[in-house]
Amino acid sequence: MAVTISAIQFHPVKKPLKQPFLTVLQQVEAREATIVTLRDADGFEGYGECVAFDTPWYTEETVVGSRYVMEKVLAPLLIGQPLSEPADADSSFSAVKGNHMAKAGVEMAVWDLFAKRAGMPLHQFIGGTSDLVPAGVVVAANKNDIEKDIKQAVEHGYRRIKLKISPASDVALLENAVKNFPDTIFYADANGSFSGRAQKELTLFDGVGFSLIEQPYGDQEWHLHREARKAMQTPICLDESITCLEDVKHMVEQQAGDIIVLKMGRLGGWAETLKVVEYCRQEQVGMWVGGMIEFGVSKAHNLALASLPEITWTGDFSASDHFWKKDIITPSIRVEQGKIKLSKDAGIGYRLTL
Ligand code: OSB
Ligand code: MG
């Protein structure tokens, strides 16, 4: 039986972070996002979250622009259209170029609604097999007291820590930190900051002990990622470069990376992300689910994604109280013994407390 979306609402949320989030691209002190709620003719609801930032520092999209696209462009394409499966939502947006975060914000709500109609947790609905997802947290590495932050994260139970790096990072300090926490898995994320630098500035980081280095060069600098991959032992992982399935195929053809970061906002939602997961499974490309300093709705969708058996690397999954005094969902997301237990309730499994 086809499902028809009868109403969509957009709820702006803005909260200060407990601590500023530092990257080479931006210092984030407050987070604004848009929560999408939609309803079908039978009264079922679905929730999504648009993760565009207030300015275009991570991708081109913005909070204001994505709201315009969701309200004026995407909502009219969806409302009243019969959907026989959740992937039809993405198809109904096919004439709209780009705007992946806006599309994902709306499309993810449709998947939640379909899972709720089926009376199933979203993680089961999409074929997930695990209900315990390993947690991972991000620590800014451009400070001298980084070991204090690592120690704190370890005490909170995190067994995977991602350090933000740049050509200005102190390699010896990082090497020491990694050595001092032998039971912790460390990733490095450069957010493209080695662009325009000599390769040897990057290869210095090869001996630190990182399990992977994320996005050393620019989005389109495939050849530099390919050269880095040849020159280094540490696996190269791409984040900003991957905006669709074609980009993953390009990465494999160019031998420009070993692993990718899945972000549904950047990829445009569940439909495209599940295609990417299937391709990566076939091509044996490693995968993990990346964070966007997001609220609980986006995180709940991400947790469902991470329950897929093909996703073997630990993602950016921090507890609700890591960034926020109070998240916008109940119950809140908790990390226990380094893991997050997925909800047994239908859909994303959390209620909104906007
Ligand atoms: O590059 O992975 C990134 C947050 C916002 C934008 C880009 C990135 C990040 C993170 C993840 O590093 C932070 C998180 O845990 O949410
Ligand atoms: Mg990244």
Image (tube, rainbow, N blue to C red):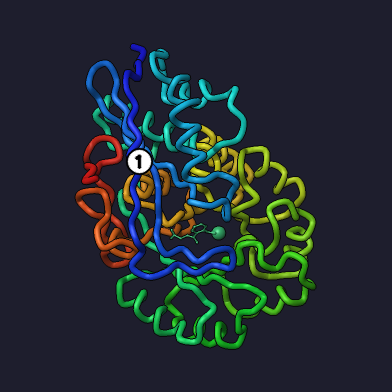
Spot occupied by residue 256 in the image (x, y as percentages of width and height)? 72, 54
User: Residue 236 occupies which quadrant of the picture?
Assistant: bottom right
Determine whether, in the image, residue 68 is placed left or right of residue 6. right
Determine whether, in the image, residue 257 is placed left or right of residue 270. right
Quick one: label 1, few (<14), some, or many (20+) residues within 10 Å? many
Q: Is residue 33 above or below residue 157?
A: above
Q: Is residue 23 above or below residue 2?
A: below
Identify which residue is drawn at 63% across, 73% down: 166
Identify which residue is drawn at 31% across, 71% down: 157
Spot occupied by residue 119 in the image (x, y as percentages of width and height)? 24, 29
Spot occupied by residue 113 in the image (x, y as percentages of width and height)? 31, 29
Q: Is residue 218 above or below residue 19?
A: above
Spot occupied by residue 162 in the image (x, y as percentages of width and height)? 49, 68
User: Residue 99 occupies which quadrant of the picture?
Assistant: top right
Q: Nearer the viewer, residue 165 or 127?
A: 165
Residue beneath disc 1: 35
Q: Amino acid at mark 1?
A: Ile
For the C terminus, give its image quadrant.
top left
Identify which residue is drawn at 65% across, 50% down: 241
Q: In this view of the protein, can residue 29 be seen by the observer? A: yes
Determine whether, in the image, residue 123 is placed left or right of residue 329. right
Q: In this view of the protein, can residue 286 be seen by the observer? A: no
For the N terminus, give its image quadrant.
top left
Indicate if the residue with disc 1 has its beta carbon within 8 Å of ligand 1: no
